[in-house]
Amino acid sequence: MLADKILTAKFRLGLFENRFVDLEKKKELLFTEEHKATALESARKGIVLLKNNGILPLQKTTSKKKIFVTGPNANNQSILGDWHAVQPDENVTTIYEGIKTLGETKGYAVNFFNSGENIRNIKSSKIKEAAKKARNADYAIVVVGDNSMRYKWKNKTAGENMGRANLDLFGKQLDLVKAIRETGTPVIIVLVNGKPISEPWLQDNIPAIVEAWEPGNLGGQAVAEVLFGEVNPSGKLPLTIARSVGQLRMIYNHKPSAYFHKYADESKTPLYPFGFGLSYTNYTYGKPTLSNGSLSGNEKITVSVEVSNTGEFDGEEIVQLYIRDNVSSATRPVKELKEYQRVVLNTGETKTVEFTLDAGSLAFYDINMEYCVEPGEFTIMTGSSSARKDLKTTTLTVNDKIEL
């Protein structure tokens, strides 16, 4: 519950014992080195690599290659999202600043062009100028998405109290991307947004897409570290991203009768499935095994799965476990996420990841509204995302009804 989190924070801050704040102490208590380290690590781990045809990570160069950075979210505080006040510039590393700082240490010349920060009003003349400048670059990094900054309310395209009828890139942002792509310069997309963006054209035509979300004060540094391979991306999508509004409601834990029929004009699969996220390395999964093939009473079952890093980069993988109640008195989802673990794997390393399941992991309210586990078979799935192709399965049997 949100209220629980707010009250817990207030208790930990001591506001119930002393509700008055000493403003003189704010420099000692806010934006400390510890806070910055936490913010940076959160941004690093939250970034999701959606597509990469091999262009990333950008390699160190001695030939002074050129990187061109543009886009409405490239060099401002949109990375802070909604409900923030304007921050001192020295406290915020924009995406352009992060790329320039790290890119220059890697041998790149990094240039920026302001193609327009108001997503609602990107001018065609700016798009043409951006494309002209991109033509001479080796890489173009285009930072697009949404604007949630409430102190720029007339420019806002997302955030609280700002709904939209569509999920695509707002305004002329896609025109900007297309114009730069037509120059022949390889394009890398960085998305800055607080809600999912459905833009299949990007997936079909752009070599690399990085979902940065709204990564906070040091988000620009985190994005740059991912682009240049200082950080191997490990984030996974916390939701399913539809191809269009017409696919909604698009969720991974749907009932078996959903998405049964094809669309006349669109695939019935999502643009990106729940739990999806790429890495610069490759992970292979073994078949899950159970400590016991059946469950009864208060027993606990251990699910074990071997995960190997078979690529060329050290990395972190988020191993996911889903279940399905194959036959039940009331309809249940095709899969439900029950557990996940973040696992550090060096190149060539294999680890056995273990999860624990008990009756509480399988229980639901049956047709009589009794909270229980019905007898029958449950499919246990482990893998790198909720997509069927990414999961391997085994079967757990419950012989008798378990009441909770």
Image: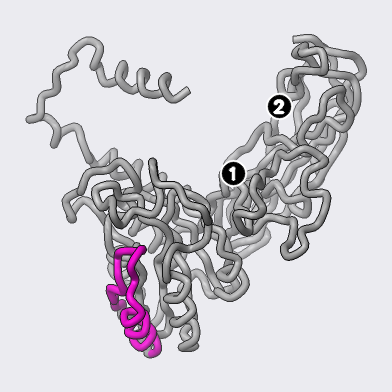
Kindly indicate the quadrant of the structure image that contains residue 125.
bottom left
Q: Give the residue displayed 31% in from the left and 67% down from the top.
A: 96
Q: Give the residue displayed 25% in from the left and 16% down from the top.
A: 14
Res. 230 visible in picture: no
The residue at the far left in this view is: 24
Q: Nearer the viewer, residue 57 or 179?
A: 179
SS for dot 2: strand
Label 2 Cα neighbours within 10 Å, binned few <14 / some 14-19 / many ≥20: some
SS for dot 1: strand
Q: Which residue is mark 2?
A: 356
Q: Give the residue displayed 41% in from the left and 64% down from the top.
A: 144
Q: What's the magenta region?
A: 110-135
Res. 404 visible in picture: yes
Q: Amino acid at mark 1?
A: Val
Residue 242 image position (x, y, % from top left): 62, 54
User: Is residue 67 rendered to the left or right of residue 322?
Assistant: left
Please tell me whether residue 191 is drawn above or below residue 82 in the rendered image: below
Q: Nearer the viewer, residue 157 or 311?
A: 157
Residue 184 image position (x, y, % from top left): 49, 88
Mark drawn on residue 235:
none
Q: Which residue is mark 1?
A: 343
Q: Give the residue displayed 62% in from the left and 52% down from the top.
A: 276
Residue 404 image position (x, y, % from top left): 74, 10
Q: How many marks?
A: 2
Residue 168 image position (x, y, % from top left): 52, 61
Q: Amino acid at mark 2?
A: Thr
Please tell me whether residue 236 is drawn above or below residue 295 in the rendered image: below
Kindly indicate the quadrant of the structure image that contains residue 99.
bottom left
